[in-house]
Image (tube, rainbow, N blue to C red):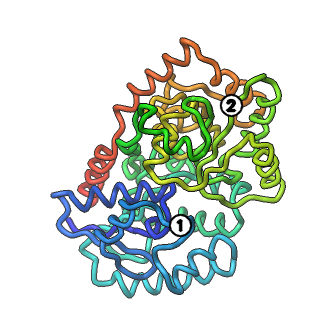
Amino acid sequence: MNIILGCDPLLMPLTGIGHYTYQIGKGLHTSNDVDHLDFYAHGRFFEPRELLERHECPPLAQNQPIMSGVFSSLRASVARSRLAVKAYQHVIPWLDRLQLGGKRDAIFHSPNFMLPSFRGRRIVTIHDLSTLRFPEYHPASRVMLVNDQIKKATRYADHIITDSVLVKQEIIDRFSVSPDCVSAIPLGAETRFCPYETSSTSSVLNALSLTHKEYFLFVSTVEPRKNVQRLLQAYKQYRQSVAAPLPLVMVGAQGWADQSFRSLIEDLVAKQWVVLAGYQSNQSLAYLMSSAKALLFPSIYEGFGLPALEAMQSGTLVVTSQGTSMQEICLDAAIYVDPLSVESIQHAILKASEDSREQSEAIQLGLEYAKSYSWEKCVEQTLNVYNTVA
């Protein structure tokens, strides 16, 4: 098989979709089932080994792009400007037709919602429908771009991949897509996410003035769609209700947010209740995950919720949202909250802070459930979809 993998998520420091793209790309690069592999984004081809090796090293400075030039700048500005969205939508398809015209014998897999102008076989991964279901949690320009691309993908893709059964069913119901054309393929967690002894994690914890199992952890881009405002309000109430509260460490890049949201974060940081740890390397994140008392991840909506799986695999208790895809992963190995209720989240934080037999059992169940997920399985099932459309 000849495969072209969309690689635009690899051109910036890796977040959720970036990690997915990296793992799929790495698996395809070493697969005996793939005769030739190209990486493609923004009207040009990239050498797969070069991009993959860049992410084997420590991360680039936050928001520093790998790709430079006019199209990188245009892509970055899309999140801020409706005019940029329109420019992107007009210029990139022309480049796609020019560059991909001679590759019609290949299968193009877009890992990030967006199908190019390509006349060969097309597969797209749609991770979630958050811009359709919760547009208020995204910049308007992002909503316009992503929703347009999702509708295009559901119309023209030969096959759609989702991260969860929940999103698969949403796509079938909303766009009347045949169930045979949609595959739910769960993600995996890197093997570096595992329980660690304190001798391994001390340097990372010391740098942030943290103590093993004496802090809560939040991992995600810090923006409203992750329900951060309610989480922080609940955490503030928790701090005010107990004698010896644990700090909250927030790991992730700063995303889009309004001023009231930023003011709440700044207030809690100023009180030294919250630690903004920023973007961390994969290994540092693994140490932080293993050493946390609990992962607090009460998202309103997730296509999968990779941090929850990483926490379970690390032997860390998970606090997350009921009625979401996270329940597919965690089953009965988590403390569930109503993500729209500050009081529910506060109660769960208090419960997670306590040592109990119930919490210990949840952690052991999480370690067991996590064994059924791996990036190797994800790549294998993705290759099965390629063979289906070949």
What number is the disc on residue 279? none
Amino acid type shown at disc 2:
Leu
Determine whether 324 is above or below 275 in the image: above
Answer with left or right where residue 160 lies relative to residue 333: left
Q: Which mark is residue 61?
A: 1
How far is the residue under mark 2 from the one under mark 1?
A: 29 Å
Look at the numbered discs 2 and 1 and tell me whether their residues touch, using CB distance below 8 Å.
no
The 10 Å Cα crowd at callout 2, few under 14, some 14 to 19, many 20 or more, is: many
Question: How many marks on residues?
Answer: 2
**Could you tell me residue 279's position as x and y percent?**
56, 56
Q: Nearer the viewer, residue 73 or 152?
A: 73
**Amino acid type shown at disc 1:** Ala
Left or right of 228 in this view: 95: left
**Residue 169, visible in the rendered structure:** no
Residue at 51% across, 34% down: 291
In the rendered structure, find residue 246 and report the number of the disc placed on it: 2
Task: Say which of 272 and 294 sits in front.
Answer: 272
Q: Secondary structure at mark 1?
A: loop
Disc 2 is placed on an element classified as loop
